[in-house]
Amino acid sequence: MKTIITSLVLLCSLAACAQTSSTEQKPEMPKGMKQYYIGFLVRGPNYQANISKEEREALFQKHIAYIRAQAAAGKYRLSGPFLDDGNIGGMLIIDVPTEAEAKEIVSHDPMVEAGRFALELHRAMLADVSCVLAEYKKAGGQ
């Protein structure tokens, strides 16, 4: 009888282990940390496209309006340009659950749609920045 009970416990334990996939388990997030996606806006295939200053300015204003809308929706936690003249134009901290959703959101940025920027995306564990409120002034400093 003792052997039967021991065998049943062992079989149940093995069955439970077999049902738990190691790919389903996510590492524990340390206290105060959260998963984000970091997007780098790199020079796209049309970065050097010859467009007029007026067209470039209009596209830039649409780009900024899109970033502000995503920040207001809670999708972009932080964003901003790099101030050097390197290959990376700017950075986004994107607060969404999946990589596919992050790519989908950034793909609708007017600068990405126009091909002036392309997305380089990385999953990251960062300090929780959900308490940071980014306020953007409207055109004209208001």
Image (cartoon, rainbow, N blue to C red):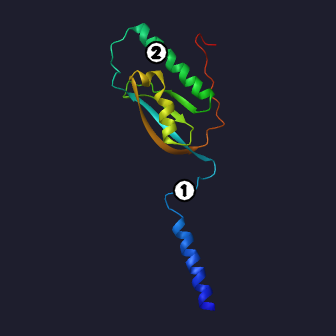
Give the answer, above or below, for where 14 lies relative to 109.
Answer: below
**Residues at discs 2 and 1 in contact (Cβ within 8 Å):** no
User: Count the marks: how many?
Assistant: 2
Q: Quadrant of residue 45?
A: top left
The disc placed on residue 59 is 2
- Seen at 47% across and 35% down, the residue is 103
Judge by depth and name the residue closer to the eye, 98 or 121: 98
How packed mark 1 is, by other alpha carbons closer than 10 Å (few <14, some 14-19, many 20 or more), is few
Question: Quarter holding the N terminus?
Answer: bottom right
The disc placed on residue 19 is none
SS for dot 2: helix
Toward the right, the furthest residue is 131
Give the answer, above or below, for where 61 lies relative to 108.
Answer: above
- Seen at 60% across and 88% down, the residue is 4
Mark 2 vs mark 1, CA separation in Å: 41 Å
Question: Quarter holding the C terminus?
Answer: top right
The disc placed on residue 27 is 1
In the image: residue 82, left or right of residue 3? left
SS for dot 1: loop
Judge by depth and name the residue closer to the eye, 103 or 39: 103
Q: What x and y, as percent, mark residue 54?
A: 43, 7
- Seen at 63% across and 27% down, the residue is 72
